[in-house]
Amino acid sequence: MPMTTISRRRFLGTVAAVAAAGAPRPARGGTAVKIGTAVLGDYSMAGPVIVALERGFFAREGLEAEFVPFRGGPDLLKAVMGGDVLVGITGSTDILVFREAGSPIKMVATHTEGNHFTLNVAPDVSSVAGLKGKAIGVTRVGATTWIFARMLAKKEGWDPDKDVQIVGLGGLDAQLAALARREIAAYVWGDGGAVTELQGKSKVLLRFDAVTGKWISQIQYASEDAIKHQADPIRRSLRALFTALKLMRESPRDAAEICSKKLGWPPEAVLRAHRISGPLLPVDGRIDVAALGVMQGTLLEYDVIKKKLPLEDHFTREFTPVRV
């Protein structure tokens, strides 16, 4: 089944499937927690939660866990801030954007190192140079995908406003439809580009750490209130997630079988996504402050944020390194 923009009903169906998957449950009285992701259709983001549930890693930590995927970072933020979700997993630039907007949240661990975003091109495009004079699809103007497209143009020595056209299109369905109509020649996406590559609709030309250099792709975060009052469940949740990340690194075929059903991707597509993101899966969640600084500088350069807040405001080292 192709990766598509997923409806709320479909989200809830997937969550129910995860809950019913037969993972060992903690004894009565286990601490109930919800783990949220900004989207479902990303292997490195959602995979660790799926694996931890399926293999009983949350249960082993005495947690009654529920996986709740959302339709984007802002929806996840509301749930974390409202106390409905204990740990949120999202794109790393969210912590810089949301903190600047006044949201009292902090990064608690790195979820995906480097930059796992991919440049996905039409099957007849063989190089980045072939995109000059053509259009590149992104989710929306001002989004991280938009920044990456402009950084790519700059790296190639192009004027991003004249030599290429960067078009905000929304979700993957819209990107693929525009690609099929030849309205765009490429689009920026996460490791889910492996699915459409397997289908022959596009191909992964590069991973964006070749463009951005130092970066943190995805993070785990919590509200300051939860960090203060629920540190132990956060710590146990992270141990479960990093146990899952260890399995994903060491046994990608097993992880692919586990994740395939929940993501709705063929196992081969999950393995292709692992080839993109697998080298970036973290061992203990330690936070690269220098990379966070590069990201902050990039967002300031592209006018996505206006203020340079102290980097230390964005994270806590209370939970890392995670020991499993």
Image (cartoon, grey):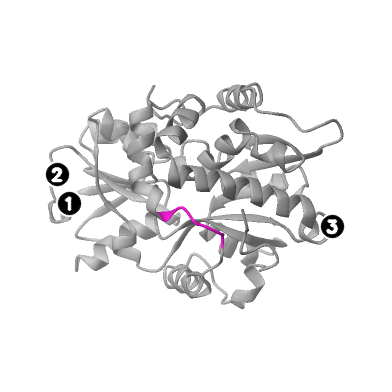
Tell me the amino acid under the disc marked 3: His
Residue wearing tag 3: 229
Distance Cα–Cα, label 2 vs label 3? 52 Å
Residue wearing tag 1: 131
Q: Residue at x 35, y 68 (%)?
A: 213
Q: Is residue 155 left or right of residue 280?
A: left
Nearer to the camera, 7 or 46: 46
Nearer to the camera, 63 or 15: 63
**Boundaries of the magenta span:** 280-285
Hey, which quadrant is residue 202 in on the image?
Answer: top left
Q: Nearer the viewer, mark 3 or mark 1?
A: 3
SS at mark 2 in the image:
loop
- Rate crowding at label 2 as few (under 14), some (14 to 19) or many (20 or more) other CA atoms within 10 Å: some
Residue 275 x, y percent position in the rendering: 33, 45
User: Which mark identifies residue 125?
Assistant: 2
Q: Nearer the viewer, mark 2 or mark 1?
A: 2
